[in-house]
Image: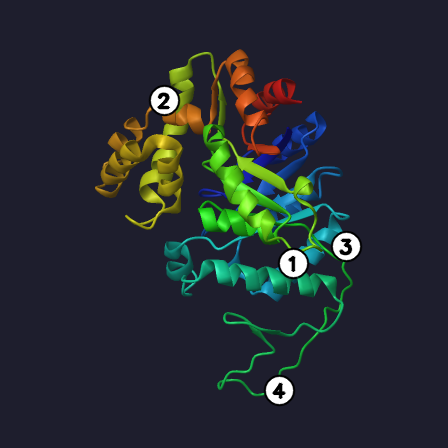
Amino acid sequence: MKLGLGMGYWSSGPPPGMLDTVLEAERLGFDSMWTAEAYGSDALTPLAWYGSHTTRMKLGTGICQMPARTPTALAMAAMTVDHLSEGRLLLGVGASGPQVVEGWYGQPYPKPLERTREYVDIVRATVARAEPVAYAGRHYTLPYSGERGTGLGKALKSTIHPRRPEIPVYLGAEGPKNIALAAEIADGWVAMLYSPHDDGWYRERLAEGFARRSPERSPAPEFEVVCLTPVVINPDVEAAADMVRPHLALYAGGMGARGANFHFDAIARAGFEAEATKIQELYLAGDKKSAIAAVPTAMVEAMALVGPPEKIRDDLAAWEAGVVTTLLVSGPPAMLRVLAEIVL
């Protein structure tokens, strides 16, 4: 089991003391650090900034939202960061959700799996730089051939040469078809709201994708699973769980509409459908305090590591037996030191 530092996305501004945390994570032997984006701070700029202060940790985007950039624009940024970091980039991408895609980016959300497949194809072709990039898909066409164009577009090849002919691509996924797609076309999967108690279900979804994997893709044993895992070290288990309840309430109740919330579905699959339904009803009714209080400790313990170090050490056994290869954690340097002692 490896450890990754999850830096997430900013709230109202840059998190204080993050550089110290990054430097401590590298000193402790963390394998990677990961940024994120929603509709505020972007994933690439903080990753490049903090990455410039490190020499060993891999740099992951968990995730870059596809509607935020055209595939060639993301490939440009990826090649740039990969050069500056001397080949340490792990490129996590994902479709995001309908509220963000249509509300923030003003783009249609339907057909996310089909769109993801085309997007990754173009990113890889751009980075490989074997020939000028030309693509004819249902969602992306290069060069542009629509009626509103000039007709002067031509297939182009990146002016810069990539440091590596292929940058590892990870897919952020929660739904069953998207998880299978990650196993089929990607080098890794960025997971969240995963429970090791449902590891068999996840293995089945990954096996579906591996069975469709093309021969030239890396074999399944090299496939990485990076999981965003809340960790709170506290001798009082209930107090530790209280720190995670708002996170689960937000995702079960507030990150998506009723009937169209992938996070709700993931929590329900873990055996908490009735609880998630109650949390969602309270959250959507505006009673966030009650929604948070409705998150049971059992739900927290199924999807997070909470409690004193000895309990976390015992609970970790289920995670180590599952598909996850890297625990993506966040916290102050003192917590990272304890966690590194337990895991590494």
Q: Amino acid at mark 4?
A: Leu
Q: Could you tell which of marks 3 and 4 lies nearer the N-terminus?
A: 4
The image's colour scheme reads rainbow
- Numbered disc 3: secondary structure: loop
Residue under the image location 40 percent in, 22 percent down? 241
> Which residue is labeled 1 in the image?
77
Q: Which mark is residue 297?
A: 2
Q: Could you tell which of marks 2 and 4 lies nearer the N-terminus?
A: 4
> Which residue is labeled 4 in the image?
152
Which x, y percent locates residue 71? 59, 64
Label 3, label 2: how far apart the Cα atoms are:
45 Å
Closer to the camera in the image, 105 or 108: 108
Label 1, label 2: how far apart the Cα atoms are:
41 Å
Label 3, label 4: how far apart the Cα atoms are:
31 Å
On the picture, is 64 further left or further right than 215?
left
Q: Nearer the viewer, mark 1 or mark 2?
A: 2
Residue under the image location 58 percent in, 88 percent down? 151
Residue under the image location 45 percent in, 29 percent down? 303
Q: Could you tell which of marks 3 and 2 lies nearer the N-terminus?
A: 3
Asked if residue 315 is positioned above or below residue 77 in the image, the reply reads above
Closer to the camera in the image, 245 or 278: 278
Q: Could you tell which of marks 4 and 1 lies nearer the N-terminus?
A: 1
- Numbered disc 1: secondary structure: helix
Q: Could you tell which of marks 1 and 2 lies nearer the N-terminus?
A: 1
Looking at the figure, which quarter contains the C terminus? top right
